[in-house]
Image (spheres, rainbow, N blue to C red):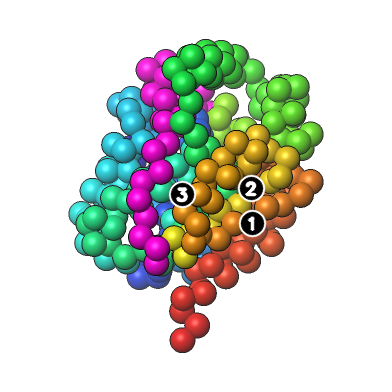
Amino acid sequence: MRFHNYGNERNPIIIMLTSSFCSAESLEYLYSDLAEDYFVIVPEYNGHYEGSKDFTTRHKEAAEIVQYLTSRQVKDICLIYGQSMGAEIGMELINQLLKHRIHIESAFFDGGTFLRQPKLYKAIMNFKHKSMMNKMKNQSVDEVVNWKSVDEFRNQDTQTMRPVIESMVKTAPVISEESIKNETEARYTFNFPPIPEDMQENIFFVYAKEEKNFKSCFKHLIEAYPLANFKTLSGQGHLTYSVKKTDDYLRVIRAICNRNNDD
């Protein structure tokens, strides 16, 4: 794993975790602004860049982030932010950071894939993911943006999601089949780690009502973390609000970061 740092390291720390198969650059539309007031750390997962070892498990990816933070003697995190699979890694990261007595002020997770699925389902999704990434190796960003499957997933709003799609096209030539398999496993084996009540109160989950993850995950999240904060959006696809309404979205992130610092 490698780490991209943006902003002044004396500022409050935000950790930003990307979606599946995405490079760190997929979050540039957010961290380029946040770096003015925060020290933003964007881990790039194993298997997602030239010369890296394979992606293994959600737990090990989170452990490498913890190791990096402890090596820098970090004691306080302003915000952990995660998109899609990054939300799952983010929840595991919270679990591990608390065990290392590193304080986390807040967390914000968008479109998280908080699921446990049977072996057959994971095998099917692994095949789909491998096919998708292999196809991307030989296609331009413009071609991928116009895929029907991508359009349906993004609620007919693929042009808006171009930064994320461009990042996946960049990752496709370097990611191995083993990394794709392990990443698929990581997405569908979420185990709902125990989170203290005071931490739950500072976690924010957001979903578009139309996205599949909302329909399959929302009920289980509320049951597991009843004191967390939940927000649903209408008329959006998976992650589209963050790109389509970036200014509003950044205001939300900043409000979450500042909510515990009003005094």
In this view, the residue farthest toward the front is: 223
The alpha-carbon separation of the residues under discs 2 and 3 comes to 17 Å
Say whether residue 18 is visible.
Answer: no
Residue at 31% x, 65% y: name it: 103
**50 or 100: nearer the viewer:** 100
Q: Which residues are magenta?
A: 170-199
Query: Above or below — where is 125 with respect to 77?
Result: above
> Which residue is drawn at the image coordinates 42% and 48% (left, top)?
90
Residue at 73%, 40% in the rendered image: 210
The span from disc 3 to disc 1 (Cα, nearest Å) is: 16 Å
Q: Earlier in the sequence, mark 3 or mark 1?
A: 3
Where's residue 72, x and y in %?
24, 58
Is the C-beta separation of discs 3 and 1 under 8 Å?
A: no
Q: Which corner quadrant of the image does residue 60 belong to? A: top left
**Looking at numbered disc 1 in the image, what kind of residue is underneath it?**
Lys
Q: Which residue is mark 2?
A: 207
Q: Tell us which disc is closer to us: 3 or 1.
A: 3
Q: Residue at x 22, y 57 (%)?
A: 100
Q: Amino acid at mark 3?
A: Ala
Q: Which residue is mark 3?
A: 224
Mark 1 Cα within 10 Å, few/some/many (few <14, many 20+)?
few
**Does residue 160 appear to the left or right of 203 in the view shown?**
right
Label 2, secondary structure: give it: strand
- Mark 2 or mark 3, whichever is nearer to me: 3
Label number found at residue 231 = 1
Label 2 or label 3, whichever comes before in sequence order: 2
